[in-house]
Image (cartoon, rainbow, N blue to C red):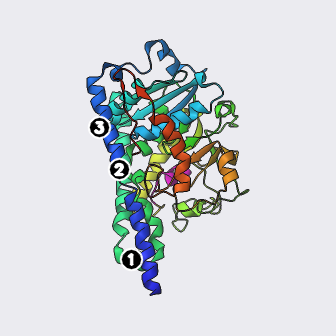
Amino acid sequence: MEQKVQSAKKRELMYWYLASRGVPKSLHCLCLKLAEEYAVNAMARSCLPPPEHVSRLADTSFNHIVLLTDNVLAASVVISSTVENAANPEKLVFHIVTDKKTYSPMHAWFATNRLKSAVVEVKGLHQYDWSQEVNVGVKQMLEIHHLICSHYYNNLKENDFEYGGEHQNFLEALSPSCLSLMNHLRIYIPELFPELNKIVFLDDDVVVQHDISSLWTLDLNGKIVGAVVDSWCGENCCPGRKYKDYLNFSHPVIPSHLDQDRCAWLSGMNIFDLEAWRRSNITTSYHKWLKLSLNSGFTLWQPGVLPPSLLAFQGHVHPIDPLWQVAGLGYRSSSAGGQILEAAAVLHFNGPAKPWLEIGSPEVRSLFGTMKTSSNTVRNQSRGKKVLASVSA
């Protein structure tokens, strides 16, 4: 009976990850409705940003925020929460990069629900004119990441997983982020925004609770990325996200000088010095590690986006205050208490249980739901009806 209980728990965990790959009907219908709006409503196709604000897109005196996403609702929540809590929202410029499939709905939403102060740009990947070298690099990167995820996915044999806990880390291969083009494309941010020198990157599964304008004046001490390293619980306190939780230190290719018990830096909310990035070889190093993983039979690290970035950005990370970001809210339980959650500038719902899915805990989803409600009630005045009033129905 104990074996059956353990088996049921592990099956439930696998199904939980599989459920994270689903798209709620409301989100699917939202994109269809907005795509229709883009086709029939001239306002939904109007310029983003308007011509008088185009100059801000490359003006380094403004605070530039980058989102790579194919989720309209999530992008709306990220931007709404950032603007609502900004001391000077008129200084904010949002750059949304999305795929061709989502471009029309994304453009329609932000064109018909314009912000009074901040500027929003929506750009599809199909609108970039990249060099052949970059195109080839992106294609190779995606192919290797797909092979890594497929390798671990195929290793999740039901019998092995059922009675062997050593395969539990393979579950990240079931996460939709493992195969997401938008998720992996962050390594090409300098190529996406060649005219910018400093940006804040936000994942689409975050909620901003406080003003983040001081990030742009943060001194990175010559480093390329500013990121939370130690958690709120203290120095070198980061349960479940140390280097040894991501990298296979038994493999000779992994550098022996790396500290296994060192905390891995958090993605989700980062400040990037793009000028310093362009002077480095980080993107080249990232591709080198991907090829080493391919040649080693995908045994260098656990599936996911972060492991190769930990290796490529090694020595280029500047730690910032832990209260800039509290992460892990998309997993079964978060050890962060109510006071910590309230004090955090950014809440990151990384993990399978995204706040727009019903598999998330009600307490954590409510933190996202407050912002969703405020962004869902905007009316499309040109057609005299609500475009998104029933998204959460």
Sequence order check, earlier mark of 2 and 1? 2
CA distance for labels 3 and 1 = 41 Å
Query: Measured along the vertical axis of the image, is residue 278 above or below residue 247?
Result: above
Confirm or deny contact between disc 3 and disc 2 (CB under 8 A): no
Q: Is residue 235 magenta?
A: no
Residue 50: in sight, yes or no? yes
Task: Report the magenta residues as a range.
Answer: 303-311
The residue indicated by pointer 2 is 23
Name the dominant secondary structure of the magenta segment: helix
Residue at image point 53% right, 60% down: 246
Amino acid identity at mark 3: Leu
| Left or right: 277 in relation to 51 | right
Q: Nearer the viewer, residue 122 or 317?
A: 122
Q: Residues within 10 Å of mark 3 (few under 14, many from 20)?
A: some
Q: Nearer the viewer, residue 265 or 161?
A: 161
> What x and y, as percent, mark residue 212?
64, 34
The residue indicated by pointer 1 is 160
The residue indicated by pointer 3 is 32
Residue most toward the bottom? 1
Residue at image point 35% right, 56% down: 147
CA distance for labels 2 and 1 = 28 Å
Give the SS element for disc 1. helix
> What x and y, as percent, mark residue 305?
47, 51
Sequence order check, earlier mark of 3 and 1? 3
Confirm or deny contact between disc 2 and disc 1 (CB under 8 A): no
Q: Quadrant of the N terminus?
A: bottom left
